[in-house]
Image: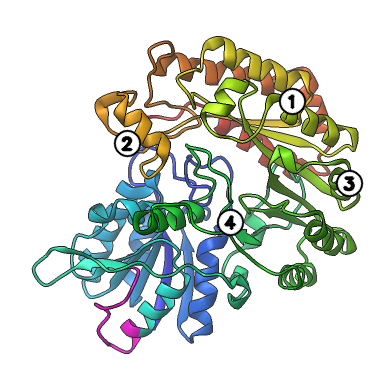
Amino acid sequence: MKITFLTPPVFGKERPAERTAGCTTLVYPMINIYELTVAAILEKEGHSIRYENFIYGKRSQGKWVEFLEKDRSDVYIFWSVNLSIRNDVEASRRIHRRSPDAFIVYMGPGPTFYTKEFLQNSRQIVVRGEPDVTARKLCSLLSNRQPYEALRGISFLDENGNIRNNPSRELLRDLDSLPFPARHLIDGKRFSNPKLKCVPYTAMVTSRNCPFHCIYCVPSSLTFARELEYRSGKGKKPFISMRSTENAVEEIELLASEGYRAIGFMDDNFIVTEKRLKIIAGALQKHGIVWGCQARADAITESIARILKESNCLYVDLGVESFNDEILRYIRKGLTRQQIIDAINCLNKYGVPVKLNILIGTSPLETKATIKDTMDMAIRLKVDQVMINIVAPFPGTEFYDLANQNHWILGGEYVPTDVQHHSILSYPDLTHKEMEKLLFLYNIKFFLRPGFIWSQIRRFSSFSEFWRALKALKNKLTRSKK
């Protein structure tokens, strides 16, 4: 069966959605390692797989029309997030105008929660939550023209046009059973990570989900889809699934043999134990691969920081959100201001660059003063990078319930929003306009400091690396259209 993984062009004036983290518009091209894993599964099953990304290829809508006229795929698969819902639904309509018998399969957090919006006819199917096993079984049934109506983990329209949500599928525990992502389907040269400043670059994942209980959290599009589906049936967070260190090292060995020089780990929490980190970091160090990861501040110790430095770790992404202890308690971060400061100082001591994720408005306790204190601390502590977003009340999170009950959401209901530029929240003491203004001002204050600019320029090994990072910064600072 011929299957095409498809990211369509943008049909309106908005920016394209970023589909890996899943809650912002695109800042720089990111490899969607989650859908490439599904692609590898289906390829292993004997299907003919294509990967068509009209955003990263910068192909025009004219090229899209040409593609639709010539292509005869049996199945088109979309990895959809909240910000891509309208565009993906429109793309599906255009596909079915030319190929009415093709099946369209949706995966990701968007269709997992907003199932109704995606199901317009009987040739459209939603794969909810964790997609790997469900997609494999579904495509096998479609290929053999067998009934799929009893398959767990899918939603579709029945013969009467009503939505049918089948029972959920059990989550994967053994991630080693999955094949490595089908990176050969993409042109790896198009991808880079400004924090690593080295190509060829790819992303990698060694675990799924995290054990902590932050009330607002949407750490990645796969995690969110997985959590939305699990919570709907179990009423709690899903368990963590982890790859063995042997399996992770095997993938690193493969990537090194294919010439990759940089890896960004997309795990919600990459640093779990020192023993595990040491094994994986040792494999990276062996091949001279530069890398970065996401971690919690309370995972950073002297020995951890030493391992990171010795193994060429060029960034640690710390989700801190705020330096205010009352706010940290409110959002159940499980961290204190002092723990965050200690972690940053420890990483600075060993020369490991720190990127802080700061989230404005996670609590009604937030004020202009708390935001100023957080940003001033980030600058004072000499972190390498910051990512400043405004919290969004994503449906399916505890924060959404709080925002809904307290009437903090503008218009009364969540709408997909680019959290890097816009807010749909207003508190009694902090309006959405004030949050947007502070977000913009502190981005300018941090990124246009002469010291920051000079420190970044010195790290680039080529003009092309500098140019890619400059374009990413432009996207970050430029206000997008609502």
What is the crowding at mark 4: few (fewer than 14 residues within 10 Å), some, or many (at least 20)? many
What span is colored magenta in the figure?
141-153
Which amino acid, mark 4? Ile
Q: Secondary structure at mark 4?
A: loop
Q: Secondary structure at mark 2?
A: loop
Mark 2 or mark 4: name the one nearer the start of the chain: 4
Tell me the residue that label 1 is attached to: 338
**Is 240 on the left or on the right of 87, as rendered?**
right
Relative to 6, say whether 452 is above or below.
above
The CA span between labels 3 and 4 is 31 Å
Which amino acid, mark 2? Val
Q: Which mark is residue 303?
A: 3
Mark 1 and mark 4 in contact? Answer it, CB < 8 Å. Answer: no
The CA span between labels 1 and 2 is 35 Å
Which amino acid, mark 3? Ser
Mark 1 or mark 3: name the one nearer the start of the chain: 3
At 67% across and 50% down in the image, what residue appears? 192
Tell me the residue that label 4 is attached to: 31
Mark 1 and mark 2 in contact? Answer it, CB < 8 Å. Answer: no
Mark 3 or mark 4: name the one nearer the start of the chain: 4
**Is 271 on the left or on the right of 407, as rendered?**
right
The CA span between labels 2 and 4 is 26 Å
Tell me the residue that label 2 is attached to: 415
Mark 2 and mark 4 in contact? Answer it, CB < 8 Å. Answer: no
Q: Main secondary structure of the magenta part?
A: loop
Q: Percent x, y for residue 473? A: 63, 32
In this orientation, which residue lies closer to the viewer: 441 or 273? Answer: 273
Relative to 125, say whether 18 is above or below.
above
Count of numbered labels shown in the rendering: 4
